[in-house]
Image (cartoon, coloured by chain):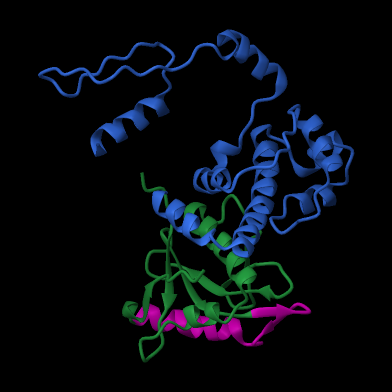
Chain colours: A green, B blue
């Protein structure tokens, strides 16, 4: 009884390593737990049941996942980009302070990565969970 | 589903991680349930606000998955508006893990008091249970003896799934 609604992917850099996984590794344990709780619900239900979990950014097609805490995590992701109704791809690890993304160009960087994946779908891999 | 359950069982060996994960999940679940219950009744946020003597902005905040300042008083106000009862209890982590694995908009819906009690009475106050017989060996393996007329479609699907994968 496999009831996942979406499949999660991570962006891979030129050398083939998983940047999002490395970003997650650097987080505190509590932050990783909160991030995984949100990602599990995203994978299982999409954003229908939890509409505020995903919000837009200044860059069209790039979304940020909201994870509240002492540090506001704002990983950048997109629907698809290969199968828009079935996937989310985690593109770039970012945080937010005083309503500003850290790094400030996180959404633009995520968009660049999304374009790379559209050109070459091998530049992503199945999401690697870090607990 | 089983994969996520196994993952969480392993991860929850760490107390700090387990509490942080379940805190986050329970915030999401309560916010989602308020939204699901409101939509189940066809109400707008403003209508729920009026029925629970709150401002619409407050209902909007309560439906935000990141809201984490719940009070029993607020939950009781909402339960009265929905005509439901609030059940507050301490739970084992295994129950929490099952909640994570089962959550969806259907599992969060609840029937209001009057309709619920009517169904409850019709169901002989919960006495009508669903019983499955052991499978019967026949030449046609798709045949199984069912001893009740109160079987829901979901039960049949669940039974069929387990039979196929057994």
Above or below: residue A102 compared with residue B73: below
Above or below: residue B121 compared with residue A22: above
Please report the residue visible at 58 percent of the width from the left and 48 percent of the height from the top: B93
Q: Can residue A51 be seen in this view?
A: no
Please report the residue visible at 60 percent of the width from the left and 59 percent of the height from the top: B18
Q: In the image, is B91 to the left or to the right of B156? A: right
Could you say which quadrant of the image residue B159 lies in? top left
Could you say which quadrant of the image residue A52 lies in? bottom right
Pick out the residue farthest to the left: B139
Q: Can residue B116 be seen in this view?
A: yes
Please report the residue visible at 51 percent of the width from the left and 61 percent of the height from the top: B11
Pick out the residue farthest to the bottom: A15
Question: How many numbered circles are shown?
Answer: 0
Q: Position of residue B5 (x, y in %)?
A: 46, 51
Q: Where is residue A67 in the image (x, y as percent from the top left)?
A: 65, 67
Q: Nearer the viewer, residue B37 or B133?
A: B133
Q: Which of B101 and A65 is in front in this view?
A: B101
- Residues rendered magenta in the picture: A95-119
Give yes or no for residue B45 being in the magenta stretch. no
Q: Position of residue A124 (x, y in %)?
A: 38, 77
Could you say which quadrant of the image residue A8 lies in? bottom left
Quadrant in which the N terminus of chain A is drawn: top left
Q: In the image, is A97 to the left or to the right of B100? A: right
Above or below: residue A101 compared with residue B145: below
Give yes or no for residue A113 being in the magenta stretch. yes
Q: In the image, is A70 to the left or to the right of A33? A: right
Q: Which of A21 and A84 is in front in this view?
A: A21
Q: Position of residue A87 (x, y in %)?
A: 42, 63
Above or below: residue B97 compared with residue B131: below
């Amino acid at each position: 009884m496999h009831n996942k609604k979406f499949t999660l992917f991570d962006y891979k850099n030129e050398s083939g390593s998983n940047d999002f996984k490395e970003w997650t590794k650097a987080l505190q344990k509590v932050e990783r737990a909160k991030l995984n709780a949100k990602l599990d619900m995203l994978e299982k239900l999409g954003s229908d049941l939890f509409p505020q979990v995903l919000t837009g950014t200044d860059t069209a097609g790039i979304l940020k996942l909201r994870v509240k805490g002492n540090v506001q995590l704002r990983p950048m992701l997109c629907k698809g980009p290969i199968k828009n109704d079935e996937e989310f791809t985690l593109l770039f690890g970012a945080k937010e302070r005083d309503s500003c993304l850290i790094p400030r160009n996180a959404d633009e960087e995520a968009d660049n990565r999304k374009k790379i994946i559209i050109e070459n779908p091998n530049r992503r891999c199945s999401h690697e969970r870090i607990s | 589903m089983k994969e996520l359950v196994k993952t969480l069982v392993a991860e929850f060996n760490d107390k700090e991680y387990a509490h942080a994960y379940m805190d986050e999940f329970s915030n999401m679940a309560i916010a989602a349930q308020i939204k699901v219950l409101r939509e189940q009744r066809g109400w707008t946020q403003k209508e729920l606000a009026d029925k629970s003597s709150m401002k619409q902005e407050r209902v909007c905040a309560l439906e935000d998955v990141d809201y984490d300042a719940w009070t029993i008083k607020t939950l009781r106000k909402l339960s009265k508006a929905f005509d439901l009862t609030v059940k507050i209890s301490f739970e084992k982590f295994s129950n929490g893990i099952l909640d994570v694995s089962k959550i969806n908009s259907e599992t969060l819906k609840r029937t209001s008091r009057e309709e619920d009690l009517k169904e409850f009475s019709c169901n002989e106050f919960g006495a009508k249970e669903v019983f499955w017989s052991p499978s019967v060996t026949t030449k046609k393996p798709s045949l199984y003896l069912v001893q009740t007329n109160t079987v829901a479609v979901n039960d049949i699907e669940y039974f069929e799934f387990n039979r196929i994968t057994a």
